[in-house]
Amino acid sequence: MLRIPRDEPVLLASDMHLAPEAPRTAARFLAALRRHGPDAAHVVLLGDLFELWVGDDGADALAAELAGVLSGLATGGAQVWLMRGNRDFLLDAPLPDGAVTPYSRRCGATLLTDPTPIELHGVPALLAHGDALCTDDLVYQQWRSTCRDPAWQRAFLARPLAERFAIGRAVRETSEAGKREKPGALMDVNPAAVEAAMRDAGARLLVHGHTHRPAVHHWGDGDTARTRVVLTDWHSDGDSNGDREGDTARGAMLLWRDGEPVALPPA
């Protein structure tokens, strides 16, 4: 288990959904990462770094810029950790020819499993993207199981890159259209699934993203006090990016310092 002592600050963020169609969001997040990253001993990005990821050979200039910033932080002494999300579940997935360096390695990062149990400043904790906890959405959970199957990924990654991008865009559009028709509660975590995951991991703290519902939840589970921290997604006014178009600007990093979370402004 990863144990992070109290004297090592941890910078957390998720759901940046970086995309060429959202240049303001990307610039805002990268500026925040450059500003706050050097203050952290650990930089942890909990999934949906990108709006669309069809394989490590499809990395664009924006992905290269993020990799440059993260590798710079790693060179400076930080440990960088990445987790896959529902948009970028193909991060580091092996390509048929193996000719492309895995994206996490380009970032100087280590890929985390979802979920990952850790000890955070003395507290048993669980890090997750969050989508696996949305168990009420049966259609999505079926898709999640399919697209994470190694055989499905091998077959998809064997297709030409242009075809993968076309399929990925079509799936994204279908997903966004479907979300507009779903009840909001269906896309949030299931409380029973949260408690089961935390009990299985022996965790008192859960940190995740995915739901775009930033909050801190406290409750009692028998004699155990539990906390769930939901990270915010990122969006800047004027950007067009999925269902975030037209929403107010948002996005913040969380610095876990001396055992306490501190919200950091983006710039």
Image: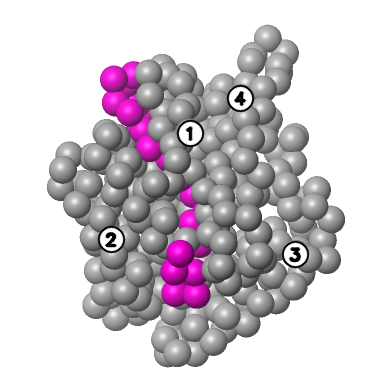
Please tell me whether residue 67 is drawn above or below residue 228 in the rendered image.
below
Q: Which amino acid does label 4 sit on?
A: Thr
Residue at mark 3: 179
Q: Is residue 96 visible?
A: yes
Residue at mark 2: 67
Which of the pair 163/27 is nearer the observer? 27
Residue at mark 1: 263
Instruction: Tell me where the magenta segment starts and ends, as one range.
Output: 1-24
The circle drawn on residue 9 is: none
> Which residue: 44% across, 69% down?
23
Front disc: 4 or 1? 1
Residue at mark 4: 227
Separation of disc 2 and disc 3 at Cα? 30 Å
SS at badge 4: strand
Query: Counting residues from the N terminus, which is met first, the one under dot 2 or under dot 4?
Result: 2
CA neighbours of label 1 inside 10 A, class few (<14), some (14 to 19), many (20+)? some
SS at badge 3: helix
> Which residue: 54% across, 74% down?
152
Separation of disc 1 and disc 3 at Cα? 28 Å
Front disc: 1 or 3? 1
> Which residue: 56% across, 50% down?
250
Q: Where is residue 27 in the image (x, y as percent from the top left)?
A: 39, 61
Query: Counting residues from the N terminus, which is met first, the one under dot 4 or under dot 3?
Result: 3
